[in-house]
Image (cartoon, rainbow, N blue to C red):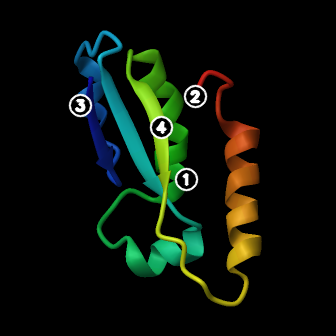
Amino acid sequence: KASFATKFVNPDLLGYEPRGRTRIRFSLMPPADARLLDLRTSPVAERIAAAGDFLDAGYEVHFNLSPVVLRPGWQRDWSELLTHLDDVLPRAV
């Protein structure tokens, strides 16, 4: 199975037919960290929102949760991100 990680939502990939043989892994971190570290990439919220579209298109969808930046408030921010994922993702993701 092909597998690739990305921080960019490329809607052109939705036109391919992965037939369940391709895994896309969206890299995520709390938005406050992403604003400093993920320059010139799709916003975290956009990556999360795209997960269902990629699943519907036949991709296996995973998330890379990294990097974990140890700073004041890091546990709270990760907790909020994980809660948000649980709240908005389709159950199948």
| Disc 1 from disc 3: Cα separation | 19 Å
Write the residue at 30% across / 34% down: 11
Task: Give the SS element for disc 2.
Answer: loop
| Disc 4 from disc 3: Cα separation | 19 Å
- 4 above or below 74? above
Circle nearer the viewer, 1 or 2: 2
- 85 above or below 39? above
On the image, numbered disc 4 is attached to which residue? 62
Circle nearer the viewer, 4 or 3: 4
**Label 1 Cα crowd, 10 Å radius (few <14 / some 14-19 / many 20+):** some
Residue type at mark 2?
Val
Write the residue at 73% across / 74% down: 75
Task: State yes or no: discs 1 and 3 in contact (Cβ < 8 Å).
Answer: no
Task: State yes or no: discs 1 and 4 in contact (Cβ < 8 Å).
Answer: no
On the image, numbered disc 3 is attached to which residue? 12
- Answer with left or right where residue 45 lies relative to residue 36: right
Total numbered circles: 4
Instruction: Tell me where residue 3 appears, x and y as whole percent.
Output: 28, 34
**N-term-proximal mark, 1 vs 2:** 1
- Answer with left or right where residue 50 lies relative to residue 21: right
Q: Quadrant of the C terminus?
A: top right
Q: Quadrant of the N terminus?
A: top left
| Disc 1 from disc 2: Cα separation | 15 Å
Using the image as rendered, state which of residue 38 and residue 73 is in the foreground. Answer: 73
Instruction: Tell me where residue 85 appears, x and y as whole percent.
Output: 67, 45
Using the image as rendered, state which of residue 62 and residue 36 is in the foreground. Answer: 62
- 88 above or below 17? below
Task: Give the SS element for disc 3.
Answer: helix
